[in-house]
Amino acid sequence: MDELISNAPLLVFMIVGTIAVAASFLVVMMRNPVHSALFLLLTFLCVAILFVIKAAEFVAAVQVLVYAGGIMVLFLFVVMLINYRHLPEERMTTKYTLGGVAVGVAIFLLFFTVVRTGAYHDEAPGAAKKLTTVKETYLAEHPTDPNKLVRRTRARENRNAEAVGMALYRDYLVPFEVISLFLLVAMIGAIVIGKRELSAVEEETAPDYMLERVETEKEVKELLSA
Amino acid sequence: MPSTAQYLMLSATLFAIGLVGVVARRNMIVVLMSIELMLNAVNINLVAFSHRLADLQGQVFTVFVITVAAGEAAVGLAIIIQLYRLRSTVNVDEVRSLHG
């Protein structure tokens, strides 16, 4: 126990890791999707803390902004748009439950046996190297001839966001552009798929709330024309 | 400092839980959430190895994975919304018109 208290990152890892596992378990177990979404949010925040422990502050910030801020809002919007009272109750135990748990346990045991061999227990040879170092070039006076300038590099430490940004825009510029194009395509796809357009056939199968909406639009038009 | 092995164990647990959710749950939205859980487990692995090998590649790749997860969630949720409008269901088993 004294060892745990003296080793604060390990203590934080134990607590946050336990919360993350419990929350992710509840995501799968909760019957109400709103509860699932909120526990998923808790899991994302815990994972962000785990990133900070491993000196990945920029990724942690992105995790909170994109996952906890963006994706969770999207999930909650969709969950609230869907009217669960009109849907039949989801059966929690189906013919897939046993198989699903079996597959999950099998995958966990597979990973467990891979990790347990001990290859990852010791410190890696490169672990002492500072990950957050940024090398920048600057002009300095020449040691023998003060009238001449030479180019030198200076290393600055503890700048994770800067280091990731450098790697992203220098070494991974093409993947970065490709991923921006991917985001554009995904956005257009989501808009086109999610667009509401009622044909004659769709109008028969459409749920009531949409037809009510159409009627109100019609009423507004009639009011405007009258 | 927690070791890489501990991070890998945690990530394996999260991945297994997400996999159970994908296979066992019938609600499409929860299935999508479970996929996000699995992607997060992969991100934990990448960051742990990035720290272990003192290589920023892992963190850059994590940013890419998060981006792909965002796009995937947007398109997946749009499909779910449209499916709910057309069929009034979000149950995976009831969507089988392509089933031969």
Image (cartoon, coloured by chain):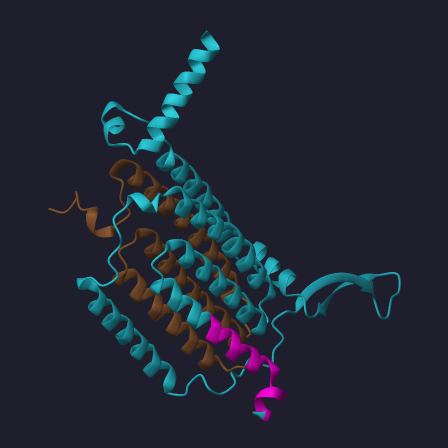
Q: Is residue A196 above or below residue B100?
A: above
Q: Which chain is drawn using brown?
A: B
Say left or right for A117 vs A157. left
Q: What range is drawn magenta here?
A: A2-19
Q: Position of residue A46 (x, y in %)?
A: 52, 68
Where is A178 relative to A110, above or below?
A: above
Q: How many marks?
A: 0
Query: Residue at the location (67% across, 66% down)?
Result: A159
Which residue sits furthest right? Answer: A146
In percent of the image, x 32 and y 46: which residue is there? A85
Tell me residue B91's x, y (percent): 25, 50
Name the quadrant of the N terminus of chain A.
Answer: bottom right
Question: Is B84 on the left or on the right of A163, as rendered?
Answer: left
For this view, does A88 lie left or right of residue B17? left
What secondary structure prevails in the magenta region? helix
Colour of chain A in the image: cyan
Of residue A198 and residue A188, the one placed in the foreground of this image is A198
Task: From this view, report whether residue B6 is shown above or below residue A185.
Answer: below
- Residue at x 55%, y 62% (from the top left corner): A59
Which residue is pictured at 40% across the width and 62% down the height?
A: B37
